[in-house]
Amino acid sequence: MQSKTKSLLLTLALGVASYCCASLSAPSKDVSAGAMMPDGSSPVLNFSDLVSGPNTGNSDISLGQTAGTDGAIVTIWGTGLGTAQGTSKVVVNGATADHIYYWGDAKPPYSPSDLNKYHKMQVVIFQVSHQAKEGAGTITVTVGGKTSNPLPFTVRAGRIFFVKTTGDDKTGDGSWSKPWATLPKIVSKGAMVAGDMTYVCDGIKQEKEDNYKAALNLIVKGGGTSNSPLALVAFPGATVSIGTSTVYYGIRSFISDKTNFGPYWTLAKLHVTGETMAVGMGTGWRMICNFITVPTGDGPTGGVTGTGDDLFFMGNEVTKVGAPGCSKLYHPLYISSPRAMKGPRLPAEANREIAWNYFHDNNANRAINIFSEQASTAYMSGHKVHDNFIINQVGGGILLGNYMTGENWAYNNVVANAGLGPEPKTSDPQGHIGVEIDCGVRDGSAPATMYFFNNTIYGCGWHQGNLCANGHVTFQNTENFTLVFKNNIIVSTGNPFFVPYGQPPKKGDWSGNLWFGLPNPPTWDTAPMTANPMFVNPESGDFHLKPGSPAIKKAKSTDTNTFAPLAFENVPRPQGGNFDLGAYESVQP
């Protein structure tokens, strides 16, 4: 099985450069077109808000530009970028970006999601130059003479609009000098078409119901397309609030039949809330660096829900989702697929990335919940769950669940203090579990493989809870999927490592994990470690390894770094040598 696993991971490594249109690709040893293997001090780009846009037509003159000369305003997140521009530069499709709105730590207000606290990211906001070449290209950053990995960017046609508190919906035309005043004007009343983008300036609030139980309903005929997506983005440094705790949805998008999500939207750097749901995502959606909270949420749904192909939920901060005692069926992020109880199998969906998010202090169960059910439901595959920081959850941390078929990956995640309790008000306990893996299809109709490696799981479970549904890790229906469970660190503060009602893995490779805090690791781990991993300060959320940690250099290079060459915070894993267990890679002198 190990040789099969290595072959699969090598295949993934060779194809990873194209798996996500705006996320960090695995650096190649063949250095070309800006691709590189970071040395620990090089700049690394993780993702951008926009992956395409025009190079002219922006009427913004806030930096002294000439109106209409240059194009879209783009934000990129990464590490090693520095806290000020200095001599650093951004190049888009061969042209240096001359207009920089912000260069610094990824904190509010320029990054509404605080991605500096644990992820240690910086952010750069710039305008695409009119000299950027049309068509497919890349974004790179050069800092101290070192050039980052590339992110893809396509220069294409599209219009650029603005909404300001000084605008006028009747006399405005959406330009910088004659902006609109409200969001419904542009997204509910037909002002935008596929390919357009709107920047929302500081102080704009959309709190009243727009229509269909939503504070903002994104009605654009036909929605966007893969080549011409739509975008709603906060202007650099702006605080934009959508939804309240008295309107059911914050943002939703229904096309003409009022049952399907409008496709290919990018929502970035917004503050979104709702009574029950903040956002419902559909095919081609990108939710990037939004601040999301639903403190009154409850019911069989999620604060953010998503179905469809090509979903990207990256860099968001999700907090205070779920009313105290809410149902176990309510989740901060609920990714699913279309369901049917009978008839032909619904078309399969694929390619969802959940990465670099910060989930904290939620009452709802399972920060990340990927699950579907019913007999003719659509299969869903190609999930990449990585580099998320999840801490202080009343309910569980992650469910990798039913109807996840094909190949799926979860790595570099930190799950700390999840499943803390108490029970929901309903009589059905929610299960206070750090991570639950229950993928495949329960009728055995489709193969599935879950790669779960180099994650850090700490202090999960409810000390007063039912021990049968309480602890750090559990697997269910293990006959239905192949599991690769390696190089993880699991530290108990008193609750079980492996939840008692769980089933041991049956197919795959599970060995070499570190288990600490209880006398005996699970018997199914064929080569466990039991030493103290020596975290720097777990009580404050610091899970870096101290010098001398027994977890340092105990993982085999053939197991993880062929697919995930960078650890949490983008520290490179050694190529050709052993690396560390868990989500972090120690920086050696």
Image (cartoon, helix red, strand yellow):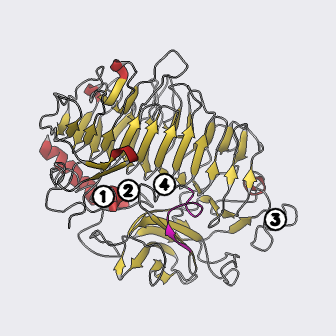
Give the labeled residue for mark 2. 19
Indicate which disc, 3 or 2, sits on the residue closer to the N terminus: 2
- Element at badge 3? loop
The answer to which of 451 and 418 lies nearer the viewer is 418
Report the amino acid beneath label 2. Tyr
Q: Position of residue 255 (x, y in %)?
A: 67, 45
Distance from the alpha carbon under mark 1 to that under mark 4: 23 Å
Q: Is residue 321 left or right of residue 351?
A: right
Quarter of the figure with residue 521? top left
- Element at badge 2? loop
Q: Which mark is residue 315?
A: 4
Closer mark to the observer between disc 2 and disc 4: 4
Indicate which disc, 3 or 4, sits on the residue closer to the N terminus: 3
Q: Residue at x 41, y 61 (%)?
A: 120
Q: Is residue 529 above or below residue 155?
A: above
Q: Is residue 350 left or right of residue 510?
A: right
Report the amino acid beneath label 1. Gly
- By secondary structure, the bulk of the magenta-drawn segment is best described as loop
Distance from the alpha carbon under mark 3 to that under mark 1: 47 Å
Give the labeled residue for mark 1. 15
Report the amino acid beneath label 4. Gly
Q: Which segment is the magenta one?
A: 102-112
